[in-house]
Image (tube, grey):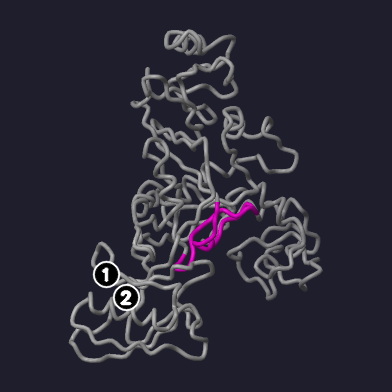
Amino acid sequence: MEDSIIKTAQAVNEDVISDRVNVLTTQPDIGDILCIDEERKYRFIQLDTFHAGTFPAAWETLGVVVMRKGNIVTMCSKHSESKKFMDVYPYVVSGYELDGTEHTAQLRLHGKPSTETYYEFKYTANTDDEFVAQLKEFLSDNGETDWSSYKDAQERVILQYDNYTSIEKLETNRTWAVGLTLTAKVESDIPRMPRMMRRCGNDGDFAWNAARAKEYFREDIESTAYNPSTDVESVPNGPVCWPAFAGTSQYQSDHCLYLRQKYCADPSNPKMEEWERYIDDLSPISPAMIGGLAPKWRGREVFDCIKDITYTAADGTHKPLYPGANYCSKSFDGKGYLPAPYEFHEVFWDVTLGLTGVTSQTADAVNRSLYAIGGDTVRANTSYWICALYSESGIYYAAFSGFSGYGNFYASVTCVPFVDIGLSEISE
Protein backbone atom coordinates (compact mmCIF):
# COMPACT_ATOMS: atom_id res chain seq x y z
CA MET A 1 0.00 0.00 0.00
CA GLU A 2 2.79 2.41 0.94
CA ASP A 3 4.64 1.77 -2.35
CA SER A 4 1.49 2.47 -4.36
CA ILE A 5 0.99 5.78 -2.53
CA ILE A 6 4.57 6.77 -3.29
CA LYS A 7 4.14 5.90 -6.96
CA THR A 8 0.93 7.93 -7.12
CA ALA A 9 2.76 10.89 -5.61
CA GLN A 10 5.61 10.59 -8.09
CA ALA A 11 3.19 10.44 -10.99
CA VAL A 12 1.49 13.64 -9.86
CA ASN A 13 4.63 15.69 -9.33
CA GLU A 14 8.19 14.44 -9.27
CA ASP A 15 9.18 17.21 -6.83
CA VAL A 16 6.65 16.24 -4.18
CA ILE A 17 8.34 13.25 -2.61
CA SER A 18 11.80 12.12 -1.60
CA ASP A 19 12.50 9.53 1.12
CA ARG A 20 8.98 9.75 2.59
CA VAL A 21 8.83 13.52 2.33
CA ASN A 22 5.48 15.04 1.28
CA VAL A 23 3.90 11.63 0.72
CA LEU A 24 0.57 11.90 -1.10
CA THR A 25 -2.46 9.75 -0.33
CA THR A 26 -5.94 9.36 -1.78
CA GLN A 27 -7.20 7.80 1.47
CA PRO A 28 -6.70 10.63 3.98
CA ASP A 29 -6.83 10.06 7.71
CA ILE A 30 -6.60 12.23 10.84
CA GLY A 31 -3.56 14.51 10.75
CA ASP A 32 -3.08 14.37 6.98
CA ILE A 33 -2.64 17.79 5.37
CA LEU A 34 -5.12 19.18 2.83
CA CYS A 35 -3.50 21.02 -0.07
CA ILE A 36 -4.66 22.49 -3.34
CA ASP A 37 -2.49 22.06 -6.42
CA GLU A 38 -1.77 24.30 -9.40
CA GLU A 39 -4.99 23.08 -11.07
CA ARG A 40 -7.03 23.93 -7.93
CA LYS A 41 -7.55 20.25 -7.13
CA TYR A 42 -7.44 18.79 -3.64
CA ARG A 43 -4.37 16.77 -2.60
CA PHE A 44 -3.49 15.20 0.76
CA ILE A 45 -0.02 14.83 2.30
CA GLN A 46 0.37 12.15 4.94
CA LEU A 47 0.91 12.95 8.60
CA ASP A 48 4.51 13.67 9.65
CA THR A 49 5.86 13.74 6.08
CA PHE A 50 5.37 17.45 5.23
CA HIS A 51 8.55 19.32 4.32
CA ALA A 52 8.33 22.97 3.33
CA GLY A 53 11.64 22.92 1.47
CA THR A 54 10.41 20.45 -1.17
CA PHE A 55 6.76 21.47 -1.18
CA PRO A 56 5.75 22.60 -4.71
CA ALA A 57 5.71 26.39 -4.97
CA ALA A 58 2.42 26.36 -6.92
CA TRP A 59 0.63 24.37 -4.23
CA GLU A 60 -1.06 25.76 -1.10
CA THR A 61 -1.77 24.17 2.28
CA LEU A 62 -5.37 24.69 3.42
CA GLY A 63 -5.86 22.69 6.59
CA VAL A 64 -5.66 19.34 8.34
CA VAL A 65 -7.91 16.27 8.44
CA VAL A 66 -9.62 16.13 11.83
CA MET A 67 -12.25 13.43 11.29
CA ARG A 68 -13.24 10.78 8.78
CA LYS A 69 -16.62 9.04 8.73
CA GLY A 70 -16.91 6.61 5.84
CA ASN A 71 -16.32 8.50 2.60
CA ILE A 72 -16.67 11.94 4.22
CA VAL A 73 -13.49 13.65 5.41
CA THR A 74 -13.68 16.67 7.73
CA MET A 75 -10.92 19.28 7.80
CA CYS A 76 -10.12 22.19 10.09
CA SER A 77 -8.72 25.33 8.52
CA LYS A 78 -5.04 26.20 8.68
CA HIS A 79 -6.06 29.50 10.25
CA SER A 80 -8.50 30.47 13.00
CA GLU A 81 -9.45 33.83 14.47
CA SER A 82 -11.09 35.31 17.54
CA LYS A 83 -14.51 36.80 16.73
CA LYS A 84 -17.71 37.86 18.44
CA PHE A 85 -20.51 35.39 18.03
CA MET A 86 -23.14 38.14 17.71
CA ASP A 87 -22.29 41.76 16.99
CA VAL A 88 -25.44 43.52 18.29
CA TYR A 89 -28.58 42.34 20.08
CA PRO A 90 -31.78 42.77 18.05
CA TYR A 91 -35.31 42.29 19.36
CA VAL A 92 -38.27 41.68 17.09
CA VAL A 93 -41.07 44.04 18.17
CA SER A 94 -44.69 42.92 17.92
CA GLY A 95 -47.99 43.47 19.70
CA TYR A 96 -48.30 47.15 18.78
CA GLU A 97 -51.54 48.72 17.56
CA LEU A 98 -51.89 50.35 14.11
CA ASP A 99 -55.24 52.12 14.38
CA GLY A 100 -54.22 55.79 14.35
CA THR A 101 -55.06 56.35 18.02
CA GLU A 102 -52.61 57.01 20.83
CA HIS A 103 -51.19 54.06 22.72
CA THR A 104 -48.69 53.92 25.56
CA ALA A 105 -46.16 51.20 26.18
CA GLN A 106 -43.73 50.82 29.06
CA LEU A 107 -40.09 50.20 28.13
CA ARG A 108 -36.91 49.47 30.01
CA LEU A 109 -33.78 49.34 27.85
CA HIS A 110 -30.97 47.27 29.34
CA GLY A 111 -31.75 48.43 32.86
CA LYS A 112 -32.47 52.05 31.91
CA PRO A 113 -33.73 54.49 32.93
CA SER A 114 -33.30 52.47 36.16
CA THR A 115 -34.37 49.23 37.75
CA GLU A 116 -37.17 51.02 39.59
CA THR A 117 -38.63 53.06 36.72
CA TYR A 118 -39.40 52.74 33.04
CA TYR A 119 -39.97 54.85 29.94
CA GLU A 120 -43.43 55.64 28.67
CA PHE A 121 -43.41 55.29 24.90
CA LYS A 122 -46.42 56.99 23.35
CA TYR A 123 -47.14 56.32 19.69
CA THR A 124 -49.90 57.01 17.17
CA ALA A 125 -49.37 54.99 14.02
CA ASN A 126 -51.31 53.62 11.07
CA THR A 127 -48.41 51.73 9.45
CA ASP A 128 -45.27 49.87 10.46
CA ASP A 129 -43.17 52.64 8.95
CA GLU A 130 -44.90 55.27 11.09
CA PHE A 131 -44.39 53.09 14.17
CA VAL A 132 -40.66 52.71 13.43
CA ALA A 133 -40.28 56.45 12.85
CA GLN A 134 -41.92 57.22 16.19
CA LEU A 135 -39.80 54.60 17.97
CA LYS A 136 -36.66 56.18 16.51
CA GLU A 137 -37.80 59.62 17.68
CA PHE A 138 -38.49 58.23 21.16
CA LEU A 139 -34.96 56.78 21.38
CA SER A 140 -33.43 60.07 20.22
CA ASP A 141 -35.51 62.20 22.59
CA ASN A 142 -34.39 60.09 25.54
CA GLY A 143 -30.73 60.10 24.56
CA GLU A 144 -30.67 56.35 24.00
CA THR A 145 -27.83 56.43 21.48
CA ASP A 146 -26.97 52.77 22.13
CA TRP A 147 -30.28 51.73 20.59
CA SER A 148 -31.73 51.91 17.07
CA SER A 149 -34.82 50.73 15.21
CA TYR A 150 -35.59 49.68 11.63
CA LYS A 151 -37.47 47.11 9.56
CA ASP A 152 -35.55 44.00 8.55
CA ALA A 153 -35.69 42.04 5.29
CA GLN A 154 -38.78 40.18 6.56
CA GLU A 155 -40.52 43.53 7.21
CA ARG A 156 -40.36 42.97 10.96
CA VAL A 157 -39.80 45.89 13.31
CA ILE A 158 -36.42 45.62 15.05
CA LEU A 159 -35.39 47.31 18.30
CA GLN A 160 -31.64 46.85 18.48
CA TYR A 161 -29.08 47.19 21.25
CA ASP A 162 -26.07 48.44 19.29
CA ASN A 163 -23.58 48.87 22.13
CA TYR A 164 -23.66 45.18 22.99
CA THR A 165 -20.88 44.63 25.51
CA SER A 166 -22.65 43.06 28.48
CA ILE A 167 -25.20 40.35 29.05
CA GLU A 168 -28.60 40.86 27.47
CA LYS A 169 -31.74 38.82 27.93
CA LEU A 170 -35.36 39.24 28.84
CA GLU A 171 -35.17 39.87 32.57
CA THR A 172 -36.96 42.50 34.60
CA ASN A 173 -33.71 44.28 35.37
CA ARG A 174 -32.56 44.31 31.75
CA THR A 175 -34.85 44.92 28.80
CA TRP A 176 -38.60 44.45 28.88
CA ALA A 177 -41.83 45.98 27.64
CA VAL A 178 -45.48 46.19 28.65
CA GLY A 179 -47.86 46.97 25.80
CA LEU A 180 -45.36 45.58 23.28
CA THR A 181 -43.76 42.17 22.84
CA LEU A 182 -39.97 41.96 22.55
CA THR A 183 -38.60 38.68 21.22
CA ALA A 184 -34.87 38.05 20.99
CA LYS A 185 -34.14 37.73 17.26
CA VAL A 186 -31.53 35.06 17.90
CA GLU A 187 -34.33 32.70 18.94
CA SER A 188 -35.74 32.77 15.42
CA ASP A 189 -32.32 32.70 13.72
CA ILE A 190 -30.79 29.68 15.47
CA PRO A 191 -32.67 26.56 16.56
CA ARG A 192 -32.19 26.03 20.29
CA MET A 193 -30.23 22.84 20.81
CA PRO A 194 -31.16 20.34 23.53
CA ARG A 195 -28.51 19.61 26.12
CA MET A 196 -26.04 16.79 25.61
CA MET A 197 -26.60 13.29 26.98
CA ARG A 198 -23.62 12.39 29.15
CA ARG A 199 -22.06 9.07 30.10
CA CYS A 200 -23.19 9.57 33.71
CA GLY A 201 -26.81 9.10 32.61
CA ASN A 202 -28.19 12.64 32.62
CA ASP A 203 -27.94 15.61 30.29
CA GLY A 204 -26.04 18.84 30.82
CA ASP A 205 -22.86 20.69 29.94
CA PHE A 206 -20.05 18.37 28.97
CA ALA A 207 -16.32 17.76 29.19
CA TRP A 208 -15.03 18.48 25.68
CA ASN A 209 -11.48 17.56 26.70
CA ALA A 210 -11.44 15.40 29.81
CA ALA A 211 -7.63 15.46 30.14
CA ARG A 212 -7.64 19.25 30.33
CA ALA A 213 -10.61 19.23 32.75
CA LYS A 214 -8.69 16.87 35.05
CA GLU A 215 -5.78 19.31 35.10
CA TYR A 216 -7.87 22.43 35.64
CA PHE A 217 -10.39 21.14 38.19
CA ARG A 218 -7.79 19.30 40.27
CA GLU A 219 -7.19 22.58 42.12
CA ASP A 220 -9.42 23.93 44.89
CA ILE A 221 -11.86 26.37 43.26
CA GLU A 222 -13.88 28.86 45.30
CA SER A 223 -16.75 29.33 42.83
CA THR A 224 -19.90 27.47 43.87
CA ALA A 225 -20.36 26.54 40.20
CA TYR A 226 -17.58 23.96 40.79
CA ASN A 227 -17.64 23.73 44.58
CA PRO A 228 -21.24 23.14 45.73
CA SER A 229 -22.61 25.10 48.67
CA THR A 230 -25.53 22.68 49.19
CA ASP A 231 -25.71 18.91 49.25
CA VAL A 232 -25.42 17.27 45.84
CA GLU A 233 -28.25 14.80 45.16
CA SER A 234 -27.50 13.98 41.51
CA VAL A 235 -24.61 14.47 39.10
CA PRO A 236 -24.49 18.30 38.74
CA ASN A 237 -24.61 20.19 35.45
CA GLY A 238 -21.02 21.39 35.80
CA PRO A 239 -17.86 19.67 37.08
CA VAL A 240 -17.01 19.44 40.78
CA CYS A 241 -13.37 20.15 41.56
CA TRP A 242 -11.31 17.45 43.27
CA PRO A 243 -11.16 19.03 46.78
CA ALA A 244 -14.95 19.53 46.78
CA PHE A 245 -15.48 15.95 45.56
CA ALA A 246 -13.18 14.67 48.31
CA GLY A 247 -14.84 16.86 50.98
CA THR A 248 -11.58 18.66 51.79
CA SER A 249 -12.12 22.08 50.20
CA GLN A 250 -10.97 25.14 52.10
CA TYR A 251 -13.94 27.10 50.74
CA GLN A 252 -16.94 24.88 51.50
CA SER A 253 -17.98 22.19 53.91
CA ASP A 254 -18.55 18.72 52.49
CA HIS A 255 -21.56 18.55 50.16
CA CYS A 256 -20.46 15.75 47.80
CA LEU A 257 -21.16 12.51 49.67
CA TYR A 258 -23.57 11.51 46.88
CA LEU A 259 -20.80 11.65 44.28
CA ARG A 260 -18.39 9.67 46.46
CA GLN A 261 -21.04 7.02 47.04
CA LYS A 262 -21.56 6.80 43.30
CA TYR A 263 -17.91 6.74 42.21
CA CYS A 264 -15.80 5.61 45.17
CA ALA A 265 -15.21 2.11 46.58
CA ASP A 266 -14.82 3.74 50.00
CA PRO A 267 -16.68 7.12 50.19
CA SER A 268 -14.73 8.05 53.31
CA ASN A 269 -11.42 7.57 51.51
CA PRO A 270 -11.81 8.90 47.94
CA LYS A 271 -9.01 8.41 45.45
CA MET A 272 -7.89 10.77 42.71
CA GLU A 273 -8.48 8.15 40.02
CA GLU A 274 -12.09 7.79 41.19
CA TRP A 275 -12.62 11.52 40.77
CA GLU A 276 -11.01 11.27 37.32
CA ARG A 277 -13.51 8.55 36.42
CA TYR A 278 -16.26 10.97 37.46
CA ILE A 279 -14.80 13.62 35.11
CA ASP A 280 -14.71 11.04 32.29
CA ASP A 281 -18.37 10.35 33.02
CA LEU A 282 -19.18 13.99 32.18
CA SER A 283 -18.11 13.41 28.58
CA PRO A 284 -21.01 13.23 26.12
CA ILE A 285 -22.36 10.10 24.50
CA SER A 286 -21.32 10.51 20.88
CA PRO A 287 -23.04 9.93 18.59
CA ALA A 288 -26.33 9.89 20.48
CA MET A 289 -29.89 9.16 19.45
CA ILE A 290 -31.27 12.07 21.47
CA GLY A 291 -30.01 15.41 22.76
CA GLY A 292 -27.59 17.81 21.17
CA LEU A 293 -25.39 15.09 19.69
CA ALA A 294 -28.23 13.42 17.78
CA PRO A 295 -27.81 13.22 13.97
CA LYS A 296 -30.08 16.22 13.26
CA TRP A 297 -27.74 18.63 15.08
CA ARG A 298 -24.81 18.75 12.70
CA GLY A 299 -22.70 21.86 12.17
CA ARG A 300 -23.45 22.34 8.50
CA GLU A 301 -27.24 22.41 9.00
CA VAL A 302 -27.19 24.63 12.09
CA PHE A 303 -24.55 26.91 10.62
CA ASP A 304 -26.37 27.50 7.32
CA CYS A 305 -29.19 29.17 9.28
CA ILE A 306 -26.99 32.08 10.32
CA LYS A 307 -23.91 32.49 8.12
CA ASP A 308 -25.39 35.17 5.82
CA ILE A 309 -27.68 37.04 8.23
CA THR A 310 -26.96 40.76 8.44
CA TYR A 311 -28.18 43.64 10.56
CA THR A 312 -28.55 47.37 9.88
CA ALA A 313 -25.94 49.35 11.79
CA ALA A 314 -26.66 52.78 13.23
CA ASP A 315 -24.94 54.37 10.22
CA GLY A 316 -27.25 52.54 7.81
CA THR A 317 -24.71 49.97 6.58
CA HIS A 318 -25.37 46.24 6.60
CA LYS A 319 -22.99 44.05 8.58
CA PRO A 320 -22.84 40.36 9.53
CA LEU A 321 -24.91 39.78 12.65
CA TYR A 322 -22.89 36.67 13.48
CA PRO A 323 -19.22 37.58 12.77
CA GLY A 324 -17.78 34.21 13.80
CA ALA A 325 -20.09 32.29 11.50
CA ASN A 326 -19.52 34.74 8.67
CA TYR A 327 -15.75 34.38 9.08
CA CYS A 328 -15.95 30.58 8.92
CA SER A 329 -18.21 30.70 5.84
CA LYS A 330 -15.45 32.36 3.83
CA SER A 331 -12.95 29.55 4.42
CA PHE A 332 -12.34 26.72 1.96
CA ASP A 333 -13.61 28.71 -1.05
CA GLY A 334 -16.85 29.55 0.74
CA LYS A 335 -17.57 26.02 1.98
CA GLY A 336 -16.42 26.42 5.58
CA TYR A 337 -18.64 26.18 8.65
CA LEU A 338 -18.48 26.52 12.43
CA PRO A 339 -18.78 23.09 14.08
CA ALA A 340 -21.71 22.08 16.26
CA PRO A 341 -21.15 20.01 19.44
CA TYR A 342 -20.96 16.67 17.58
CA GLU A 343 -18.13 17.68 15.25
CA PHE A 344 -16.41 19.67 17.95
CA HIS A 345 -16.37 16.83 20.47
CA GLU A 346 -15.36 14.18 17.95
CA VAL A 347 -12.35 16.29 16.96
CA PHE A 348 -11.25 18.03 20.15
CA TRP A 349 -11.76 15.43 22.87
CA ASP A 350 -8.24 14.04 22.36
CA VAL A 351 -6.34 17.27 21.59
CA THR A 352 -3.22 17.26 23.75
CA LEU A 353 -1.52 20.56 22.93
CA GLY A 354 -2.03 22.85 25.93
CA LEU A 355 -1.67 20.03 28.45
CA THR A 356 1.29 20.10 30.81
CA GLY A 357 4.53 19.04 29.13
CA VAL A 358 3.13 18.74 25.60
CA THR A 359 4.85 20.65 22.78
CA SER A 360 3.84 21.31 19.18
CA GLN A 361 6.21 18.55 18.06
CA THR A 362 4.93 15.96 20.57
CA ALA A 363 1.24 16.89 20.42
CA ASP A 364 -1.68 15.08 18.82
CA ALA A 365 -1.69 14.42 15.06
CA VAL A 366 -3.81 17.46 14.15
CA ASN A 367 -1.56 19.90 15.97
CA ARG A 368 1.65 18.37 14.69
CA SER A 369 0.42 18.99 11.16
CA LEU A 370 -0.89 22.49 11.87
CA TYR A 371 2.49 23.35 13.36
CA ALA A 372 4.32 21.85 10.37
CA ILE A 373 2.44 24.01 7.85
CA GLY A 374 2.69 27.20 9.93
CA GLY A 375 -0.97 27.15 10.90
CA ASP A 376 -2.79 28.21 14.05
CA THR A 377 -2.73 25.29 16.47
CA VAL A 378 -5.81 24.23 18.45
CA ARG A 379 -5.16 23.92 22.15
CA ALA A 380 -6.90 22.15 25.00
CA ASN A 381 -6.47 25.26 27.19
CA THR A 382 -8.09 27.72 24.75
CA SER A 383 -11.77 28.67 24.42
CA TYR A 384 -13.74 28.07 21.20
CA TRP A 385 -17.19 28.89 19.88
CA ILE A 386 -19.52 25.95 19.20
CA CYS A 387 -22.43 26.49 16.81
CA ALA A 388 -25.30 25.72 19.19
CA LEU A 389 -27.76 28.06 20.91
CA TYR A 390 -27.69 27.72 24.71
CA SER A 391 -30.38 30.30 25.45
CA GLU A 392 -31.55 33.73 24.34
CA SER A 393 -28.62 35.17 26.28
CA GLY A 394 -25.77 32.89 25.25
CA ILE A 395 -24.21 30.32 22.96
CA TYR A 396 -22.36 27.09 23.70
CA TYR A 397 -18.63 27.41 23.90
CA ALA A 398 -15.73 25.18 24.81
CA ALA A 399 -14.04 26.86 27.77
CA PHE A 400 -10.28 26.85 28.36
CA SER A 401 -10.97 24.59 31.36
CA GLY A 402 -11.79 21.64 29.07
CA PHE A 403 -15.49 21.93 29.87
CA SER A 404 -18.30 23.31 27.71
CA GLY A 405 -20.93 25.72 28.85
CA TYR A 406 -22.58 29.07 28.40
CA GLY A 407 -20.77 31.87 26.57
CA ASN A 408 -21.90 35.47 26.12
CA PHE A 409 -22.58 36.35 22.48
CA TYR A 410 -20.58 39.58 22.64
CA ALA A 411 -17.33 37.92 23.77
CA SER A 412 -14.46 37.43 21.33
CA VAL A 413 -13.68 33.72 21.22
CA THR A 414 -11.65 31.60 18.77
CA CYS A 415 -13.50 30.31 15.70
CA VAL A 416 -12.09 27.26 13.90
CA PRO A 417 -13.59 26.77 10.40
CA PHE A 418 -14.40 23.20 9.35
CA VAL A 419 -15.24 21.74 5.94
CA ASP A 420 -16.52 18.34 4.79
CA ILE A 421 -15.17 16.80 1.59
CA GLY A 422 -16.36 13.62 -0.08
CA LEU A 423 -13.68 11.24 -1.29
CA SER A 424 -15.11 11.61 -4.81
CA GLU A 425 -13.82 15.20 -4.78
CA ILE A 426 -10.25 14.10 -4.10
CA SER A 427 -7.99 13.99 -7.15
CA GLU A 428 -6.72 10.61 -8.23
Q: Which residues are magenta?
A: 391-413
Front residue (pair 193, 44) = 44
Disc 2 + disc 1, Cβ < 8 Å? yes
Residue 87, position in %: x, y? 45, 60
Residue 48, position in %: x, y? 60, 23
Question: For the point 38% across and 72% down, which residue is it?
Answer: 148
Instruction: Classify residue 262 as left or right of residue 103.
Output: right
Instruction: Classify residue 420 as left or right of residue 403.
Output: left
Residue linked to disc 1: 156
Give the residue type that dot 2 points to. Answer: Val
The C terminus: image quadrant: top left
Label 1 Cα neighbours within 10 Å, binned few <14 / some 14-19 / many ≥20: some
Residue linked to disc 2: 93
Residue 392 in the magenta stretch? The answer is yes
Residue 388 in the magenta stretch? The answer is no
Q: Is residue 183 above or below residue 12?
A: below
Residue 238, position in %: x, y? 61, 63
Q: Quadrant of residue 37?
A: top left
Question: For the point 64% across and 60% down, which residue is it?
Answer: 239
Q: Secondary structure at mark 1?
A: loop
Give the residue type that dot 1 points to. Answer: Arg
Earlier-in-chain disc, 2 versus 1: 2
Residue 242, position in %: x, y? 74, 59
Q: Is residue 388 above or below residue 254?
A: above
Front residue (pair 80, 241) = 80
Q: Secondary structure at mark 2?
A: strand
Label 2 Cα neighbours within 10 Å, binned few <14 / some 14-19 / many ≥20: many
Q: CA distance from mark 2 to mark 1?
A: 7 Å
Front residue (pair 386, 254) = 386
Front residue (pair 154, 17) = 154
Q: Quadrant of residue 313?
A: bottom left
